[in-house]
Amino acid sequence: MAYHSTLAGLRQTISASGQSWAGIDAEAATRMRLQNRFQTVLDIARHTAQIMRLDMAAYDADPANYTRSLGCWHGFIGQQKLISIKKHFGSTKGRYLYLSGWMIAALRSEFGPLPDQSMHEKTSVPALIEELYTFLRQADARELGDLFRKLDAARTRGDEVEARRIEQAIDNFESHVVPIIADIDAGFGNAEATYLLARKMIEAGACALQIENQVSDEKQCGHQDGKVTVPHEDFLQKIRAIRYAFLELGVENGIIVARTDSLGAGLTKQIAFSREPGDLGDQYNSFLDGEEITPSQIGNGQVLISRNGKLLAPKRLASNLFQFRPGSGEDRVVLDCITSLQNGADLLWIETEKPHIGQISGMVRRIREAVPNAKLVYNNSPSFNWTLNFRCQVFDDWAEQGRDLADYDRARLMSAEFDETALGQEADDRIRSFQADSAREAGIFHHLITLPTYHTAALSTDNLAKRYFGDEGMLGYVRTVQREEIRQGIACVRHQAMSGSDIGDDHKEAFAGEAALKAGGEHNTMNQFAAA
């Protein structure tokens, strides 16, 4: 949206409206329009979906073009991530936000903190999407407002060169509005419930929805035990429901992320419907654990299936759930992924029990035999003990190579005494390069951390409480928070401006002119941070 062309158009509109619009300043209206470039949240969904589509194509051309995101549970948290990204890297390209169902359940439910089992209010998911985009749009308005004030200052000084430079920066402004990959859990019900919730999430601005193949009313966190999967046709109904929601709302390029929890899920609630040997239902049932029986062995209330002309009694638990064969997880994951991609999904998510490139790449190679351009979203989960996992990987690799491990105890590798050792450094190097290596070797297009701010908030609050309520008192806050905010250029040190007071002053001046009662006068204590 070009500054001068928008200004010219609004001048013409105001002039054509006659004397009754004489009090409207075209430049103020232009600035407000540029600060609100997305007229509806569906504009955001279409815009961000296109960003993801272009990023997916760039990844197909070169796996070095992988993307990343951090999870968030509050609009302010998401806003600060994007402000920080622009501050440190100058561009938001390849950097998204992830909306975690786990964090909504733990931190935003009216029931109080809940486990990740789809017990939280389903409306809290679209509400957070809308909140995130409200904060991101405010970040746009704030940064553009700063540019507008610098433009006025340059004009006042008569510095035309600087004024043109700022105008160019305004015309080339990169929005903080980025794609949000939003967690719809297992759909919070049947396919119709999934469709209704998907529509709400898209109407809030979501361009990418992640859905998992667990039973909705038995849903567990992907890193907990007791996961129960559904037959493929049940899952595909929900994928189709989400696609219909995207199409209904005119977001044709919306992205569906199909997640499989089959690697860690050993149970199913249903025996799949099968029409003929080898169809999808039969393939699902082929993974069931059980034993062949004869008609004379049939017990009371026993469930039987036919396999290769013989009767099979699937292992059935007291919970009425059926058990899969041990060791069948990877095969089920591969079938899940191929089936999802062949029936409308755009990206895959394989939930694993550890961050191991060899394990992930082995499954992806098999998937790509059927779908060559298969791409993954991968959870770089805080549920993994990254330090211990990678130190054990290095230890095992070194043992296989015959290297001397006399100085290391595999049972104690988490100890700080190994931090500066050759093994500890090698493990840290592998953690550092994990995302780039797995993007190249394991087809991972997007890396995310689901719960980063849950942990950073807990850690920083613990440190602040220890210092402030201890001997340091107010110095515990000043030294570790405010002083660092000033020295690191954290915009929130001017928290009044971050909450929108400068934007409000701009509006007051446009609405009331000289009569405007502005908050940012000389007595505003925020001026103490002007140099920051």
Image: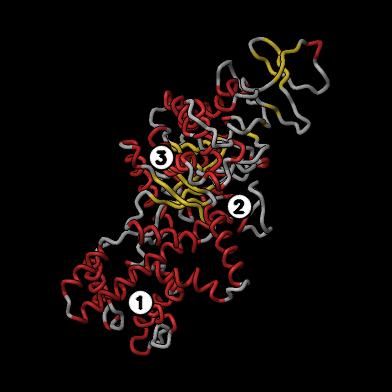
Cβ atoms at labels 2 and 3 below 8 Å apart: no
Reading the image, the residue beneath label 3 is: 445
Residue drawn at x 47%, y 40% as measured from the top left: 427
Looking at the picture, tell me which residue is in the foreground, 518 or 194: 518
The amino acid type, in three-letter code, at marker 1 is: Ala
Q: Could you tell me which quadrant the N terminus lies in?
A: bottom left
- Of tags 1 and 3, the one toward the viewer is 1
Position above or below: 399 against 388 = above
- Of tags 2 and 3, the one toward the viewer is 3
Reading the image, the residue beneath label 1 is: 531
Q: What secondary structure is found at the residue carrying circle 2?
A: loop
- Of tags 1 and 2, the one toward the viewer is 1
Residue 345, percent from left and from top: 46, 36
Crowdedness near tag 3: few (<14), some (14–19) or many (≥20) residues, C-alpha within 10 Å: many
Looking at the picture, tell me which residue is in the foreground, 303 or 496: 496
Mark drawn on residue 122? 2
* Distance from Cα at disc 1 to Cα at disc 2: 45 Å
The amino acid type, in three-letter code, at marker 2 is: Lys
Q: Of the residues under marks 2 and 3, which one precedes in the sequence?
A: 2
